[in-house]
Image (cartoon, helix red, strand yellow):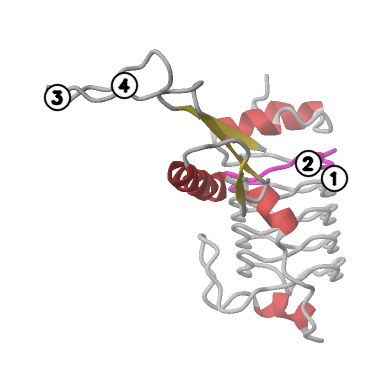
């Protein structure tokens, strides 16, 4: 919840006069304050205490707009995921990939792979573009996903045990609570990706491409073994 208080002129604050005519001295009460509250999604703003209705409406509107733009992408993704696709062939779309997929997550049609099972797939996923794919709770254990592009993918709770991500682009992927034990991140781009509570035992980070800030966050994951921490350069 975000709270903003703005003090308005009250007792002790004199307003400048543009003319030298004598006018009755305005009567000011206690300092007037108004407070706006915005919910977590930034979708509403309401006033608690105010006597300046025009000002409160403008301020609360601006605060709501700010909250929408400042909202965490992760929170938004958790709360605004679309309903599960009813396409009976939705899992097969991964074998085609995103035909116009790019690193910024542009797609012609959402790729919904949630709850799909690609265990030990060694040929169909390699080199595919799965930008902005929804992958939560899917299984990719033992699959060959080398050279894939998964920019902005949502893989919370997915299982990637033993997956080969060599030379892949995993930019801004949410791997929260994912099982990544034994994953190979050799020469893999991991910039902007998050691994909150992910299992990374035995993960290989040889020549991984990752930003300094992202590296510091990744190094806080205690499941990474000593060899993996050495490859990353964790201190």
Q: Which residue is mark 3?
A: 21
The secondary structure that dominates the magenta segment is loop
Which of disc 2 and disc 3 is earlier in sequence? 3
Mark 4 vs 3: CB contact within 8 A: no
Q: 230 and 17: which one is in front?
A: 17
**Which segment is the magenta one?**
186-201
Q: Which residue is mark 1?
A: 181
Please name the residue shown 69% across and 56% down the image.
Answer: 77
Q: Which residue is mark 2?
A: 203
Q: Is residue 233 visible?
A: yes
Q: Disc 3 versus disc 1: distance between alpha carbons?
A: 81 Å
Q: Disc 3 versus disc 2: distance between alpha carbons?
A: 81 Å
Identify the mark at residue 104; answer none if there is no mark: none
Identify the mark at residue 25; answer none if there is no mark: 4
**Would you say 91 lies left or right of 63 here?**
right
Q: Nearer the viewer, mark 3 or mark 2?
A: 3
Local secondary structure at mark 1? loop
Residue extending farthest top: 12
Mark 1 vs 2: CB contact within 8 A: yes
Mark 3 vs 2: CB contact within 8 A: no
Residue 40 screen position, x and y as percent? 68, 46
Which of disc 1 and disc 3 is earlier in sequence? 3
Residue 159 screen position, x and y as percent? 85, 56
Residue 101 to residue 52: above or below: below
Residue 4 screen position, x and y as percent? 55, 32
Mark 2 vs 4: CB contact within 8 A: no
Q: Residues within 10 Å of mark 2 (few under 14, many from 20)?
A: many
């Amino acid at each position: 919840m975000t709270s903003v208080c703005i003090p308005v002129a009250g007792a002790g604050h004199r307003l400048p006069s543009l003319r030298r005519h004598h006018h009755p001295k305005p009567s000011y009460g206690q300092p007037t304050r108004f407070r706006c509250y915005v919910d977590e999604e930034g979708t509403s703003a309401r006033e608690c205490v105010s006597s300046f209705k025009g000002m409160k409406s403008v301020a609360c509107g601006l605060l709501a707009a700010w909250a929408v733009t400042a909202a965490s992408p992760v929170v938004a993704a958790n709360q605004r995921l679309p309903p599960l696709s009813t396409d009976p062939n939705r899992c097969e779309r991964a074998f085609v990939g995103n035909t116009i997929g790019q690193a910024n997550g542009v797609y012609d049609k959402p790729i919904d792979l949630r709850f799909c099972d690609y265990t030990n797939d060694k040929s169909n996923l390699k080199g595919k573009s799965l930008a902005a794919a929804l992958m939560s709770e899917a299984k990719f254990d033992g699959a060959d996903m080398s050279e894939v592009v998964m920019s902005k993918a949502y893989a919370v709770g997915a299982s990637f045990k033993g997956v080969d991500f060599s030379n892949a682009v995993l930019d801004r992927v949410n791997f929260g609570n994912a099982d990544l034990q034994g994953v190979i991140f050799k020469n893999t781009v991991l910039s902007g990706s998050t691994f909150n509570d992910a299992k990374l035992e035995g993960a290989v980070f040889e020549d991984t491409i990752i930003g300094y800030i992202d590296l510091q966050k990744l190094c806080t994951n205690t499941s990474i073994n000593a060899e993996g921490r050495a490859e990353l350069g964790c201190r």
